[in-house]
């Protein structure tokens, strides 16, 4: 093995001077959600046998699949990469330690290591991207933003990765509530590189957060040629477009988008499963009969074991299984929920903390909701929603649980004080949520507070709520 630097000044322990560029080609393809990423990785592994960071990168990609079986293989990749730890650079050892922590059941520990790497090596774009991922799935919005922000001055527009970093920063700004700056930064990033699905996705999040639903549909449609060539991430961008239809008061159009662009029976990555279940439930909440689609979604997830890697994903799997008419699927939903409770209570893995504090109870609330125990579901969610960010995901994705809470409340106590308070608060945070306004105004009409009803109606008219 020799020591060779890449174009960003990072030292690699590798078999040839060309190895760092082959490695960076894989990383750039990953940043772009390119369909050729896997092929580039195979070339790297074939051309650079024994390269520790190549094994680490393959281990990271195995972990993205979210299964225990592949986590075991990722641990093997870490072990292979660490066969000669003294011969590696400290940065390389830290990457492999992060992989070992993640595959060993602690995404929080891995994320801390990625942050440490990025602080010491701000031009390590892989560490920056992995930390971005880790903060996203551990619910740390500020760190999604700041992890990239502190590295930006070490990059220039001449760097091929610069626009990707700008779009990552924009997404962090959006998740931190700074929508004006987020839009400005992401537009700059897309001007530099319009073929950046993460940047397009960040712009969609800005439109979602600011409730510009029609603008979101137009934007994603106009930029379709830029995001449709992406790997499975294209289904998530399509999910955003369908979500805009739903929020604009047109759940029928959302269902058409589900069939045309979102659901693929062969697409079974974690994000695909979350896209399918969360969109289909929202369409149902919009009053549309979804036919036998729940059975198809549940069939796609039924073969997954009790992987217990991410509570965000597992809760969506419970939703899909519990929504199916198949008794076997529903039994599997109950079994997975019980497994989440046991894991949170008994495991010493780092991920178990979130299952214990939030994830298992959230899945239980979803299960209760789908099995007709609306009052129990509402009671759990009312106590849990303030902490639900800990399971990870975006604000837009987690809003599903507020929508479930709203419907569970309507089923159990539509006109009580809890209903007035919950719907009233949401009418300020989601001012153009037409279904929430219907519930809120109905609850006020059944109360003795005519003054509040008059004030709410004035706000409702001013909000230009989509018809639906």
Image: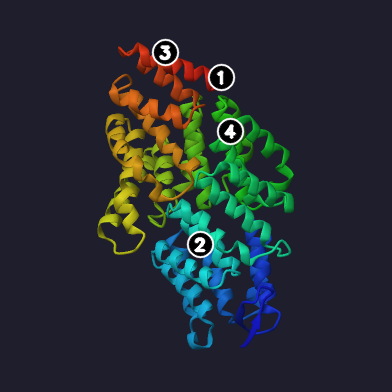
The answer to whether any part of residue 52 appears in the image is yes
Q: Which residue is mark 1?
A: 467
Badge 4 vs badge 1, beta-carbon distance below 8 Å? no
Earlier sequence position, callout 3 versus callout 4: 4
Q: Relative to the observer, which residue lies in front, 361 or 200?
A: 200
> Could you say whether the residue bearing mark 2 is in a helix, strand or loop?
helix
| Percent of width and height locating residue 361 | 30, 45
> Could you say whether the residue bearing mark 3 is in a helix, strand or loop?
helix
Q: Which residue is mark 4?
A: 244
| Percent of width and height locating residue 309 | 41, 57
Q: How is the image coloured?
A: rainbow
> Could you say whether the residue bearing mark 1 is in a helix, strand or loop?
loop
Q: Relative to the observer, which residue lies in front, 199 or 183?
A: 183
Q: Quadrant of residue 369?
A: top left
How far apart in space, not on screen, are marks 2 and 1 (Cα)? 41 Å
Q: Residue at x 40, y 33 (%)?
A: 404
Q: Is residue 92 above or below residue 314?
A: below
Q: Residue at x 48, y 39 (%)?
A: 278
Q: Which residue is mark 3?
A: 454
How far apart in space, not on screen, are marks 1 and 3 (Cα)? 20 Å
């Amino acid at each position: 093995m020799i020591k060779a630097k890449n174009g960003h000044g990072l030292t690699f322990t590798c078999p040839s001077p060309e190895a760092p560029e082959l490695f960076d080609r894989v990383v750039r393809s990953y940043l772009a959600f390119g369909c050729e990423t896997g092929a580039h990785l195979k070339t790297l592994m074939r051309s650079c046998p024994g390269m520790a960071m190549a094994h680490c990168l393959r281990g990271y990609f195995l972990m993205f699949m979210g299964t225990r079986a592949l986590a075991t293989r990722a641990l093997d990749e870490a072990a292979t990469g660490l066969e000669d730890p003294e011969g590696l650079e400290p940065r390389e050892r830290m990457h492999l330690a992060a992989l070992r922590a993640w595959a060993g059941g602690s995404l929080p520990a891995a994320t801390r290591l990625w942050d440490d790497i990025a602080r010491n090596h701000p031009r390590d774009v892989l560490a920056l991207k992995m930390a971005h991922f880790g903060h996203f799935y551990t619910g740390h919005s500020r760190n999604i933003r700041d992890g990239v922000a502190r590295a930006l001055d070490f990059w220039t527009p001449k760097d091929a990765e610069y626009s990707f970093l700008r779009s990552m920063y924009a997404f962090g700004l959006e998740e931190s509530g700074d929508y004006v700056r987020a839009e400005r930064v992401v537009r700059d990033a897309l001007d530099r590189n319009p073929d950046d699905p993460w940047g397009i996705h960040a712009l969609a999040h800005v439109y979602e957060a600011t409730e510009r639903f029609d603008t979101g549909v137009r934007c994603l449609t106009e930029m379709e040629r830029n995001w449709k060539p992406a790997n499975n991430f294209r289904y998530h961008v399509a999910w955003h477009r369908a979500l805009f239809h739903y929020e604009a008061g047109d759940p029928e159009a959302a269902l058409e988008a589900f069939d045309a662009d979102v659901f693929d029976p062969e697409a079974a990555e974690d994000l695909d499963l979350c896209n399918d279940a969360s969109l289909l439930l929202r369409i149902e909440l919009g009053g549309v009969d979804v036919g036998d689609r729940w059975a198809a979604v549940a069939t796609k997830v039924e073969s997954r074991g009790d992987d217990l890697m991410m509570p965000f994903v597992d809760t969506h799997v419970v939703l899909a299984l519990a929504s199916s008419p198949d008794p076997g699927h529903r039994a599997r939903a109950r079994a997975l929920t019980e497994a989440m409770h046991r894991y949170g209570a008994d495991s010493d893995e780092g991920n178990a903390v979130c299952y214990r504090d939030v994830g298992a109870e959230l899945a239980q609330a979803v299960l209760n909701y789908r099995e007709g125990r609306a009052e129990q579901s509402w009671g759990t969610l009312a106590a849990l929603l303030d902490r639900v960010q800990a399971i990870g995901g975006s604000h837009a994705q987690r809003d599903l649980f507020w929508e479930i809470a709203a419907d569970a409340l309507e089923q159990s106590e539509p006109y009580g004080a809890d209903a007035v308070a919950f719907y009233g608060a949401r009418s300020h945070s989601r001012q153009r949520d037409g279904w929430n306004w219907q519930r809120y105004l109905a609850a006020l009409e059944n109360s003795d507070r005519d003054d509040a009803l008059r004030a709410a109606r004035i706000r409702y008219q001013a909000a230009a709520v989509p018809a639906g």
